[in-house]
């Protein structure tokens, strides 16, 4: 890994074994983008890659520079309004109403390691030898605005982290109307755009389309990264697949409103923009003030989508997630939500926990309904103290009883919300986000607290911390069940209302930060009506997230498969739930529910007392199995093998870092009669090692499994592993061990 600056040509080259990123100072003083892709040999001059020429209708910067049309140059951080008609990365509004800016190169700095981003989640290094950071400073001579472009290249892997830090070094007040974290101009548009979209209970479904001239974008204006779109996109070459070909992934480490966009211009250049959504953003910069954008990470892979995902997985698992739980196998939990909803007593909870303990579960989680006047979802949010009618001995009493069973205790909160029917709202009705003179819309009978105000965050922090200090709580599920409407803060002046969405998220990060610092051993699981804020921003504080409220195994195939394009298995909350399933009313075999949930953090979301004795026995075996292999499931190298977005079958696998153990998951949606054999070509094995297939007398060399494949179809499987007749929603795990 290195960062080179060629003085003569004023060219920067960041590279490691996998990637090169090259940019130069243009004759006009702007920063030009030359190359991002597979590592290439360094040279003094790459300016031939500029592709600047006189074009007939182009506006140009001056008579002396008539090939200098910013419209036709690939740039690092394009501004609004001077010869470039594409959407810019930044827009600065002056007091006189001008929206123009002119960010000129003024210097650079190369440092070892990676600086922290104040108040924001970001990737990090544990040792300065792990990365190098280049800071390029741009300045607008007229306004005095400085923009520091930060680029971090890591020692290994195809990832580059970027962000921008603005400082108003002038004397007039400026407004940032747009401040994207990343812009990248690519020389052609021969790409397919992959996005991960959906809705509640159907999150992160893979959608693919070809790029054409014009704009394609996904984003969120909901105050959260959202169920609808994830702050992650991929551009891949049309022939790229999971195991070969070029692709670039773009991920934003942020949990609020975002925009991810590709614009193909009149010469087929593709401009990628990624950052805070400009539509709800306006940040006032007083003289001397600064603004830090969230971090964006881009990953280049020349070896297909699995390699791209594995780069994100490694980086996000090891250098974005933090703390005590980062590297630890996660506890197998039982959550009472689908078992009881709001209908529980202390004794009923203990009965559920007792049976779970008998089966081997390690952590009992009490979900919604334990606090204030909460008997249904229209009251109580904001009052984070136990409801004494339900829990006469409080949370401390219940957690003591759970711990006496030999389990850990976990608790649900929804700290950002308030019901009108709550003591908090009665005391502070002005603490919610609402616009003066307008009605305040509701979602799930609740309002959103104004987390842009420090006193609100302080208050909630004190309430939560008190409980965490008093009771033995080992895990917190942090929920967020409605989006923001009528966004306005009573505490901010009119010219700062465009800051509220971002300040809100900074408040959420602040609360997470304080709690995780005071209670470093508590495991946090983020949740937002399932997966509405399943993003890298929260992964920095909570090493796992509830992937979706849809707990049906077949629905989960698509959700977990789609999620895996960016996010590691260790962060995907996945549970076995009851049948018929509570979201889709489908009945799937117990083994299939577990076979899907193993590829995640694993747990149960039902009352195990209600299962038959045989089923309870099966659950015991599942838990014993997960305890044996969870390290491999959660921290192994994950490969997608067969996509649920394409047909009736899904397959994926994990391989241990030493390549000696692998587990393949194979799933069938509907059963058909007299069908062809199915087979999957495995990935990531050692070609020369001989793998024994557990529960059979068969062995195969790695090269055979990766080329000829493993036959997974029913007739063969019957012989190989099972006595079961095949059925709808069938599944199998193949465990391969090399000796
Ligand atoms: C959200 C969560 C669920 C559950 C309920 C409780 O929907 O996603 O898992 O916690 O809230 O109200």
Image: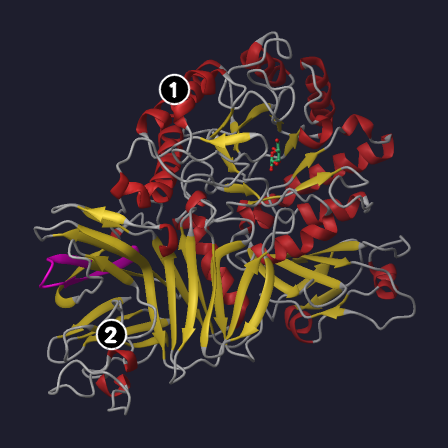
Is 679 drawn above or below residue 654 in the view shown? below
Mark 1, Cα crowd under 10 Å, few <14 / some 14-19 / many 20+, is few
- 730 on left or right of 427: right
Where does the magenta region start and end? Answer: 130-147
Is 444 drawn above or below residue 175 in the view shown? above
Coloring applied to the structure: secondary structure
Question: x and y percent of residue 636 in the render?
Answer: 55, 53
Residue at (58% x, 69% y) in the render:
208
Report ligand 1 position as a quadrant: top right
Residue 540 occupies quadrant? top left
- Label drawn at residue 23: 2
- Label drawn at residue 372: none
Question: Disc 2, ligand 1: is the CB inside 8 Å?
Answer: no
The N terminus appears in which quarter of the rendering?
bottom left
Query: Which one is in front in this view, the residue at disc 2 or the one at disc 1?
Result: 1
Is 521 drawn above or below residue 170 in the view shown? above
């Amino acid at each position: 890994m290195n960062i080179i600056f060629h003085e003569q040509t004023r060219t920067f080259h960041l590279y490691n074994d996998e990637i090169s990123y090259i940019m130069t100072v243009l004759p006009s003083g702007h920063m030009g983008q030359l190359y991002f892709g597979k590592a290439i040999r360094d040279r003094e001059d790459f300016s031939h890659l500029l592709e600047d020429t006189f074009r007939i209708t182009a506006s140009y910067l001056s008579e002396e520079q008539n090939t200098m049309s910013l419209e036709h140059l690939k740039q690092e951080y394009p501004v609004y309004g001077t010869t470039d008609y594409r959407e810019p990365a930044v827009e600065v509004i002056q007091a006189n109403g001008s929206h123009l800016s002119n960010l000129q190169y003024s210097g650079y700095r190369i440092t070892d390691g990676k600086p922290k981003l104040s108040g924001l989640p970001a990737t990090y290094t544990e040792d300065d030898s792990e990365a190098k950071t280049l800071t390029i400073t741009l300045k607008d001579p007229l306004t005095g605005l400085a923009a520091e472009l930060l680029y971090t290249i890591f020692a290994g892997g195809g990832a580059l982290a970027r962000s921008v830090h603005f400082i108003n070094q002038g004397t007039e007040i400026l407004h940032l109307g747009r401040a994207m974290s990343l812009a990248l101009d690519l020389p052609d548009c021969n790409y397919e755009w992959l996005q991960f979209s959906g809705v509640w209970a159907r999150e992160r479904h893979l959608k693919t389309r070809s790029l054409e001239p014009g704009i394609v974008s996904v984003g969120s204006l909901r105050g959260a990264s959202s169920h609808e779109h994830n702050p992650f996109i991929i551009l891949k070459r049309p022939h790229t697949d999971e195991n070969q070909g070029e692709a670039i992934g773009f991920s934003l480490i942020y949990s609020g409103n975002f925009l991810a966009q590709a614009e193909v211009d009149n010469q087929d250049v593709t401009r990628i923009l990624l950052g805070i959504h400009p539509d709800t953003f306006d940040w006032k910069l007083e003289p001397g003030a600064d603004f830090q954008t969230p971090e964006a990470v881009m990953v280049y892979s020349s070896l297909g989508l699995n390699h791209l995902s594995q780069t994100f997985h490694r980086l996000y698992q090891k250098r974005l997630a933090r703390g005590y739980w980062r590297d630890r196998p996660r506890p197998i939990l039982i959550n009472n939500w689908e078992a009881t909803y709001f209908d529980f007593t202390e004794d009923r909870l203990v009965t559920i926990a007792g049976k779970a303990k008998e089966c081997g579960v390690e952590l009992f989680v009490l979900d919604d309904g334990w606090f204030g006047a909460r008997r249904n979802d229209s009251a109580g949010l904001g009052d984070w103290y136990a409801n004494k009618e339900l829990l006469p001995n409080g949370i401390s009493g219940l957690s003591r009883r759970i711990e006496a069973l030999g389990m850990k205790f976990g608790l649900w909160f929804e700290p950002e919300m308030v019901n009108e029917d709550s003591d908090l709202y009665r005391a502070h009705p002005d603490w919610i986000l609402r616009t003066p003179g307008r009605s305040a819309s509701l979602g799930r009978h609740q309002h959103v607290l104004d987390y842009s105000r420090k006193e609100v965050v302080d208050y909630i922090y004190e309430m939560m911390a008190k409980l965490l200090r008093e009771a033995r709580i080992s895990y917190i599920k942090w929920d967020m069940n409605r989006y923001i409407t009528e966004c306005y803060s009573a505490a901010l002046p009119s010219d700062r209302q465009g800051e509220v969405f971002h300040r809100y998220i900074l408040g959420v990060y602040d609360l997470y930060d304080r709690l995780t610092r005071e209670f470093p051993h508590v495991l946090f699981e983020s949740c937002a009506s399932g997966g509405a804020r399943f993003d890298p921003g929260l992964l920095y504080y909570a090493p796992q997230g509830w992937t979706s409220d849809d707990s049906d195994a077949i629905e989960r195939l698509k959700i977990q498969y789609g999620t895996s394009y960016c996010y590691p298995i260790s962060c995907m909350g996945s549970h076995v739930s009851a049948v018929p399933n509570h979201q889709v009313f489908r009945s799937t075999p117990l083994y299939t529910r577990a076979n899907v949930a193993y590829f995640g953090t694993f747990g149960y979301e039902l009352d195990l007392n209600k299962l038959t004795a045989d089923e309870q026995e099966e659950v015991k075996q599942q838990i014993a199995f997960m305890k044996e292999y969870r390290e491999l499931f959660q921290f192994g190298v994950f490969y997608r093998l067969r996509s649920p977005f394409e047909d009736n079958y899904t397959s994926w696998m994990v391989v241990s870092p030493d390549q000696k153990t692998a587990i393949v998951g194979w799933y069938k949606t509907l059963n058909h009669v007299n069908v062809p054999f199915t087979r999957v070509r495995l990935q990531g094995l050692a070609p020369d090692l001989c793998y024994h297939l557990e529960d059979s007398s068969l062995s195969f060399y790695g090269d055979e499994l990766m080329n000829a494949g493993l036959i997974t179809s029913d007739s063969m499987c019957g012989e190989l592993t099972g006595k079961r007749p095949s059925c709808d929603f069938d599944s199998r795990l193949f465990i391969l061990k090399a000796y």
